[in-house]
């Protein structure tokens, strides 16, 4: 077995364990409430030691929001892949499809997770912090789209941050509607309001 194959197998196994621990945590949070559940409770429910749980998730917030950090790089990659002649707002809007696609695969699970996050101040704050950390990558990807690349200006950073605000507002409205409204339409509407289209 090559080193690459071993690493890949290890990564797959680690991702599977993370997914299982995350699912156990989510169910416990939904049943008992986020604030009442401790890391010890999570470890016991998952049948692992506290130290094992903490090796996969540094905090109980991360058990719910672990995927959020990786999404920033996914959006930045999607933004870099957009056609060079596309305007910034269209490119940003289309790049956010990388984040909202999972909402189409399992809307009920996505709605339950979004409700948990929005209804728990600690999770909501942590999610916004994680999303805020996407801004430099998005702004950098936006600046790189032109030939020659633009400098990383205030205007580019404002566009990146505004796109994230559009995403959050669309998610807020989608959750308030109990998932009845179409998330894609809401995100399109948010961008249209921002850009005057």
Image (tube, rainbow, N blue to C red):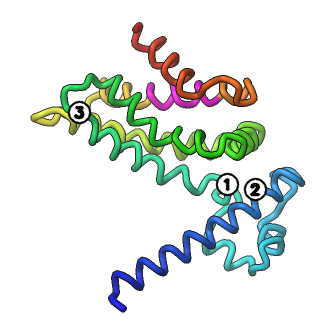
Magenta-tinted stretch: 162-171
Residues at marks 2 and 1 touching, judged by CB atoms closer than 8 Å: yes
Asked if residue 167 is positioned above or below residue 76 in the image, the reply reads: above
Check residue 64 in the rendering and tell me which mark sits there, or answer none.
Answer: 1
Lower sequence index among marks 3 and 1: 1
- Residue 116: x, y in percent? 75, 43
Residue at 45% x, 19% y: name it: 191
Asked if residue 85 is positioned above or below residue 44 in the image, the reply reads: above
Residue at 70% x, 30% y: name it: 179
Q: Which residue is denoted by mark 2 in the rendering?
A: 26
Residue 111 sits in which quadrant?
Answer: top right
- Name the element at disc 2: helix
| Quadrant in the picture for the C terminus | top left
Give the Cα distance between marks 3 and 1: 34 Å
Check residue 79 in the rendering and tell me which mark sits there, or answer none.
Answer: none
Residues at marks 2 and 3 touching, judged by CB atoms closer than 8 Å: no
Residue at 34% x, 87% y: name it: 3
Lower sequence index among marks 2 and 1: 2
Q: Is residue 165 magenta?
A: yes
Give the Cα distance between marks 2 and 3: 38 Å
Q: Which residue is denoted by mark 3 in the rendering?
A: 83
Residue 177 sits in which quadrant?
Answer: top right
Lower sequence index among marks 2 and 3: 2
- Residue 67: x, y in percent? 55, 54
Total count of labels: 3
Residue at 45% x, 13% y: name it: 192
Q: Pointer 3: residues within 10 angstroms few (<14), some, or many (20+)?
A: few
Give the Cα distance between marks 2 and 1: 6 Å
């Amino acid at each position: 077995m090559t080193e690459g194959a071993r690493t890949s197998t290890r990564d797959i196994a680690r991702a599977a364990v993370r997914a299982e621990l995350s699912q156990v945590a989510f169910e416990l949070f939904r049943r008992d409430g986020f604030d009442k559940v401790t890391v010890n409770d999570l470890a016991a429910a998952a049948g692992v030691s506290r130290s094992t749980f903490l090796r996969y998730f540094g905090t109980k917030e991360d058990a719910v929001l672990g995927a959020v950090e990786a999404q920033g790089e996914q959006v930045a990659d999607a933004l870099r892949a957009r056609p060079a002649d596309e305007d910034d707002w269209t490119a940003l809007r289309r790049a956010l499809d990388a984040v909202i696609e999972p909402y189409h695969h399992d809307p009920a699970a996505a709605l339950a997770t979004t409700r948990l996050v929005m209804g728990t101040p600690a999770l909501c704050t942590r999610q916004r912090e994680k999303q805020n950390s996407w801004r430099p990558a998005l702004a950098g990807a936006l600046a790189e789209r032109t030939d020659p690349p633009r400098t990383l200006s205030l205007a580019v950073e404002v566009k990146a941050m505004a796109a994230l605000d559009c995403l959050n507002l669309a998610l807020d409205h989608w959750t308030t509607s109990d998932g009845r409204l179409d998330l894609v339409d809401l995100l399109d509407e948010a961008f249209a309001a921002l850009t005057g289209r």
